[in-house]
Amino acid sequence: MKRTVFLFFGFYFSCAFVNAQQFENSSLEAAPVSGGSFDMRGWSRVPYDDPHCDATDASFATPDIIGVGEPDKDFGINGRPHSGRTSVSGIDGAGDGSDFYQEGIMQEVHDLIPGQEYRITFYQSVVKQKNCLDTTGCWGVYIDDDLAGISEPSLSKLPYDAENLIWDERTIYFTATRKSHWIKFLPVDDDHLYGSMTDEINGLRMGIDDITLAPGKPIAMTMIEGPVKAVLVIENKSDSLLTVHVEDASGKTVLVKKNIPIGSSEVDVSKLALGEYVLEFTDGVSIDRKKYSLK
């Protein structure tokens, strides 16, 4: 029986060579919960008194963990994540009077190489809620107290309680200046019309998911399903030989293919059991990790 290889494109998580670094819980998995408590392995809230957070009180810096229909579909605080069971969403907007919300997340990463350029790749979505109906928004990414960049805006004209969100991939670059950095993500209203809890049109709720870290520029390559047997067809568009390590769900390396030439090549995966895998590609400088499902 022919096996079909289903490929899910986008960076899964990445690391920097031997002592590879990655975000813990990069897929933002946790129990869905709205406001107040934020319990997500590896991640914490950006505090309201952070130099770049505009929230006026701790209670206005509380991002929400969301999933399909959870935790509050009627109010619109819900949505299908880019992957897994949950993602994170947060408001950037005015409250009552002088109150202001800005709800972000952060994580400290270690074992970085000073002077090395890294790329942060993530998926973003305009989530909305009943009284936050802005259709466009971004995420600001900070390295400690420095702005690394603001992502290109995303657009959604879906209703506020839609479950099938529109996810867009975005990438921000930075150069490490020391071995450890706090990396922060704060929602940004690109039109600067922040609205309020009673100005429904301009209030913004943004979602984020699948946040990954990798050294260097993306590797110029693509993968497609093989036409006859269980193979991956790799189109190496870089100017270097590639190596791919295939890891199973437990993180064990089950297949290695070295010296993948420039151009089109096949990697035989017919001996692999059906299931979920991660492919780590390297050209000797950069590393990309992509996930796929063999069914």
Image (cartoon, rainbow, N blue to C red):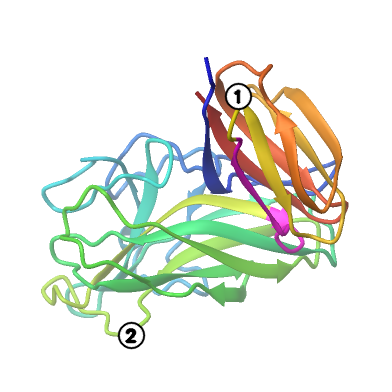
Tell me which amino acid carries mark 1.
Answer: Ala
Which residue is identified by label 2?
192
Highlighted magenta segment, given as a residue range: 214-226
Query: Residue 180: percent from the left, percent from the top?
Result: 74, 56
Name the amino acid type tagged 2. His
Is residue 216 highlighted in magenta? yes
Helix or strand or loop: what does disc 2 sit on?
loop
Q: Residue at x 49, y 49 (%)?
A: 44
Looking at the image, can residue 100 be seen? Answer: no
Q: Which class describes the residues within 10 Å of circle 1: few (<14), some (14-19), or many (20+)? A: few
Q: Nearer the viewer, residue 4 or 57?
A: 4
Residue drawn at the location 76% of the way across and 25% of the way down: 255
Q: Do callouts 2 and 1 mark residues in contact (Cβ within 8 Å)?
A: no
Residue at left offset 27%, top offset 84%: 193
Query: For residue 84, what is the image quadrant?
Result: top left
For residue 231, which quarter of the picture?
top right
For label 1, the residue is 249
Give the image location of residue 99, x and y in percent. 25, 74
Q: Is residue 125 above or below residue 81?
A: below
